[in-house]
Amino acid sequence: MSKEEPPIPVNTKTVSTSQDTGYTFTDDPWIRWRNTWRYFTGGLTVEGMKQYIEGRDARFEREDCLRCEQQRDFLLQYSPIVRFMNQKITALGGDLHKGNIRCQRCAFGRSGGFDPNYGILLCANRPEPVEDVLAHEMIHAYDFLRFKPDFVNHDLRHAACTEIRASSLSGECRFWQEFWHRSQWKLTYQHQECVRRRATISVAMRPNCKDDVEAARVVDEVWDSCFADTRPFDQIYK
């Protein structure tokens, strides 16, 4: 699991970035409003948009983490899928609780993570629903305890299998989530395409995966058996 990046220096005097990005690091309310206006109207480059998001995440880190922790505690107590997965993990000798399910600010483009020695990371500054992310990472924890995947040597087939299962079973690929939040409007095979897409992206981020082409190939190799495996559920959770 990667270490948390140092915070963006937002509590400073106005500092101009590269003129090409359109973004300025600042505490000045007017310039911050201008940054927001440019972000929503296309006045920032890709790098400028990234700088805007990182600046916003650093400025609201405390509030984001507090909100994430409140949602985590609620889900551990009341969410059907989280409670079910925690029971199954406990039965395998695991022990997940709010002490090792941590909320932090994460680097751009990440929503969470699981590490056998650390626990579960929930990225407080990402828009993904906390319940979906927590369920996803709990399925990784279950797979680690139940199937003993090779996390040490980063076996890509093992990674692809657990990513397929986590995306399929966590609820993150339910129809309305895809339709309203990800602009994926297909009516047939929507669930399968979502699972394949998200699993491929996750495998491509592994340190020993060369590119998205290799990731897609490995996902295809294990697809049939791993997509059909719904343990510990009787069927795909909706």
Image: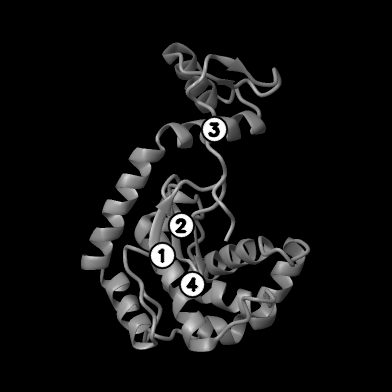
Q: Secondary structure at mark 1?
A: loop
- The residue that disc 4 covers is 166
Q: Which mark is residue 178?
A: 2
Picture quarter containing residue 237? bottom left
Q: Secondary structure at mark 3?
A: loop
Q: Which mark is residue 190?
A: none
Which residue is at a point 27% across and 74% down the rendered structure image?
Answer: 83
Residues at discs 1 and 2 in contact (Cβ within 8 Å): yes
- The residue that disc 1 covers is 174
Determine the CA span between mark 1 and mark 2: 7 Å
Q: Secondary structure at mark 2?
A: helix
In this view, the residue farthest toward the right is 210
Q: Position of residue 113 (x, y in %)?
A: 51, 62
Lower sequence index among marks 4 and 2: 4
In-front residue for pair 193/208: 208
- The residue that disc 3 covers is 8
Lower sequence index among marks 1 and 3: 3
Observer-side mark, 3 or 2, equals: 3
Which residue is at a point 62% across and 76% down the rendered structure image?
Answer: 151
Observer-side mark, 4 or 3, equals: 3
Determine the CA span between mark 3 and mark 2: 31 Å
Determine the CA span between mark 1 and mark 3: 35 Å
